[in-house]
Image (cartoon, helix red, strand yellow):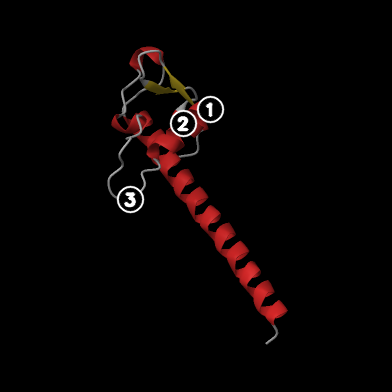
């Protein structure tokens, strides 16, 4: 095999590995987001007065173990205007549970 073909195969392999890793992380974030929405729905946090505090809302400066994607997923839900955040740091659903397709 020529050197050019080996280099091209290596580049294709690394691009494929990167794309696969992004797909896996995206699916994990989607699954974690669904669990967060289900948890808020079960706790009846449907408006600001009934908002609840979530233990994983704050990221740890010194993470232990595997990467916890719950804070990232929660932040994505807040930015996409599905979950609301009160000034006290509590969270609630901005959309009704029947609108969410849980």
Q: Position of residue 29 (x, y in %)?
A: 46, 44
Q: Secondary structure at mark 1?
A: helix
Residue 98 visible? The answer is no
Image position of 102 with respect to 8: above or below: above
| Of 24 and 92, the residue lying toward us | 24
Q: Which residue is mark 2?
A: 75
Q: Is residue 90 left or right of residue 10?
A: left
Q: Secondary structure at mark 3?
A: loop
Residue 7 visible? The answer is yes
Q: What residue do we see at 45% from left, 49% from top?
A: 28
Going from N to C along the chain, the mark reached first, 1 or 3, is: 3
Residues marked 1 and 2 touching at CB (< 8 Å): yes
Q: What residue do we see at 41% from left, 15% from top?
A: 86
State the CA–CA distance, disc 1 to disc 2: 6 Å
State the CA–CA distance, disc 1 to disc 3: 25 Å
Q: Which residue is mark 1?
A: 79
Image position of 16 with respect to 57: above or below: below
Residues marked 1 and 3 touching at CB (< 8 Å): no
Residues marked 2 and 3 touching at CB (< 8 Å): no
Specify the quadrant of the image occupied by residue 59.
top left
Q: Position of residue 38 (x, y in %)?
A: 38, 36
Q: Secondary structure at mark 2?
A: helix
Going from N to C along the chain, the mark reached first, 2 or 3, is: 3
Q: Which residue is mark 3?
A: 66
| Of 5 and 70, the residue lying toward us | 5
Check residue 65 in the rendering and tell me which mark sits there, or answer none.
Answer: none
């Amino acid at each position: 095999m020529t050197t050019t073909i080996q280099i091209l195969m290596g580049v294709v392999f690394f691009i494929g590995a990167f794309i696969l890793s992004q797909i896996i992380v995206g699916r994990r974030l989607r699954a974690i987001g669904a669990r967060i929405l289900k948890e808020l729905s079960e706790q009846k946090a449907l408006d600001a007065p009934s908002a609840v505090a979530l233990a994983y809302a704050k990221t740890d400066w010194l993470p232990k173990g595997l990467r916890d994607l719950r804070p990232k997923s929660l932040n994505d839900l807040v930015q996409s205007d599905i979950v609301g955040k009160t000034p006290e740091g509590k969270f609630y659903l901005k959309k009704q549970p029947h609108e969410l397709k849980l």
